[in-house]
Image (cartoon, rainbow, N blue to C red):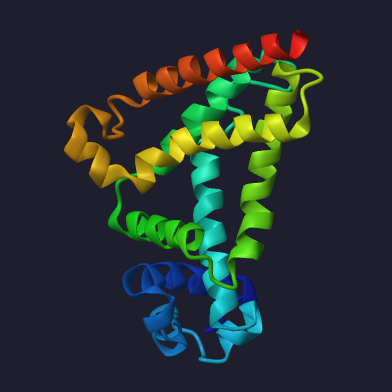
Amino acid sequence: MSAPSETGTKARLLQAGRKVFAEQGIKNATVRDICSLAGANVASVNYHFGGKDKLYVAVLQDYMEREAKRHPHDLNVTKDSPSEDRLRAYVQSFLAQTLGDGTAENERLGKLLKQEFIEPSPHFGEIFERNCRPKHSYLLDILRHMLPGVEEVVVSRCGSSIIGQCVLFDFAKEALTRMNPELTLKASNIEHITEFIMQFSLGGIERIRLAHQH
């Protein structure tokens, strides 16, 4: 029997890392457990990823990339599409990625990612630069078209406001549910929540645009 390919070993380690990190977190996960599950030599994590911490970053990046492929922020729009359509696609994509696919593993990986935003680890910078900054830059590009000539700091504040509305449904999920079950983000109401965020945000954007003209 021929030895498994390097690519195959790396893929198995990534998949095993997803499972072990999801179940145990980075502190309790061990290279031995990951390699045992992947059927790989204990030295393979260091060889393919540069150590456990780097594998952890790769797992979270893989999680975000999978979600982005399932719910792309530019679905059915292009750079030439109306800015409002681009913004709506962005918001709905953000909410859909927040909602996830309902699997326990992805739910736990999502919590690990959320923890990086609440209490950043030394790995946060790499995760943000590779996966979050491009998405944020895309949003700012939309807003610059909607607010021509407006100061960049104001555009950035608008972007932060929109993101804040979206992440509220994840970061404050339990509180929202207790306040009103209808506020809980679900597949059945994602379009309604998208439209509310759009209406609320468009009203603010229009007011800022008009104020800038005077």
Q: Is residue 139 above or below residue 149?
A: below
Q: Is residue 100 visible?
A: no
User: In the image, what residue occupies the spot 45% across and 33% down?
Assistant: 165
Counting labels gives 0
Q: Residue 73: which quarter of the image?
A: top right
Q: Is residue 54 left or right of residue 141?
A: left
Residue at the image point whose x is 47% and y is 86% from the top: 31
Residue at the image position 36 percent from the left and 26 percent from the top: 190
Please tell me which residue lies in front, 184 or 26. 184
In the rendered image, residue 91, in percent from the top left (x then y), is placed at 51, 29
Instruction: Tell me the quarter of the picture where residue 9 sits.
Output: bottom right
Relative height, residue 48 to residue 167 (above, below): below
Residue 134 percent across, percent down from the top left: 69, 44
Q: Is residue 93 left or right of residue 29?
A: right
Horizontal side of 39 relative to 153 (left or right) equals left
Choose between 142 and 42: the one closer to the eye: 142
Query: Which residue sits at x=51%, y=90%?
Result: 41
Asked if residue 172 shows in the view, the reply is yes
Task: Estimate the x, y position of residue 167 in percent, counting from the top left.
Answer: 44, 41
Q: Which residue appears farthest toward the right when viewing the image?
A: 149
Tell me if residue 174 comes above or below residue 209 in the rendering.
below
Nearer to us in this view, 47 or 98: 98
Q: Residue furthest front?
A: 214
x and y percent of residue 201 in the render?
52, 20
**Quadrant including the C terminus:** top right
